[in-house]
Image (spheres, rainbow, N blue to C red):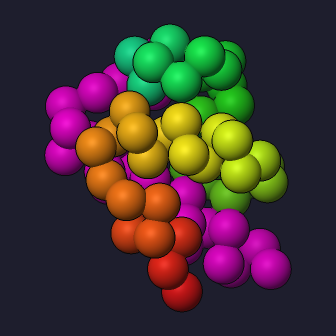
Amino acid sequence: MLARRRVIGARIRAARTDAGLTQEALAEAVGIDNKTVHRIEYGVSDPTLSVLLGLADALHVSLADLVRL
């Protein structure tokens, strides 16, 4: 499970950097704390579906692209 979370987190981090956003800017766009973004990107936290949807929207990518395994 941890390995899968890390893969998803790495995809989120890659999409964020491709979009030219900082963790702080992404967090603000989604309405979460920047520490939460950090924990998600490094596979420490299990984001809710609503947070994943918010991340996908803010990053202009599909949810499927973020969570495919």
- Please state the horizontal and vertical placement of residue 16, each as a whole percent of the image: 33, 41
- Please state the horizontal and vertical placement of residue 63, each as a whole percent of the image: 47, 60
Q: Which residue is drawn at 45% across and 70% down?
A: 64
Q: Which residue is drawn at 56% across and 46% down?
A: 53
Q: Which residue lies furthest to the bottom in this view?
A: 69
Is residue 25 placed above or below 68 in the rendered structure?
above
Quarter occupied by the N terminus: bottom right
Q: Quadrant of residue 32?
A: top right
- Please state the horizontal and vertical placement of residue 44, each as a whole percent of the image: 76, 53
- Please state the horizontal and vertical placement of residue 35, each as a whole percent of the image: 67, 25
Judge from the rendering whether residue 31 lies leftward or rightward of residue 36; answer left or right. left
Is residue 31 placed above or below 36 in the rendered structure?
above
Q: Which residue is drawn at 49% across and 40% down?
A: 55
Q: Which residue is drawn at 50% across and 13% down?
A: 28
Judge from the rendering whether residue 20 lies leftward or rightward of residue 62; answer left or right. left
First to last magenta residue range = 1-24
Q: Does the magenta stretch include residue 10?
A: yes
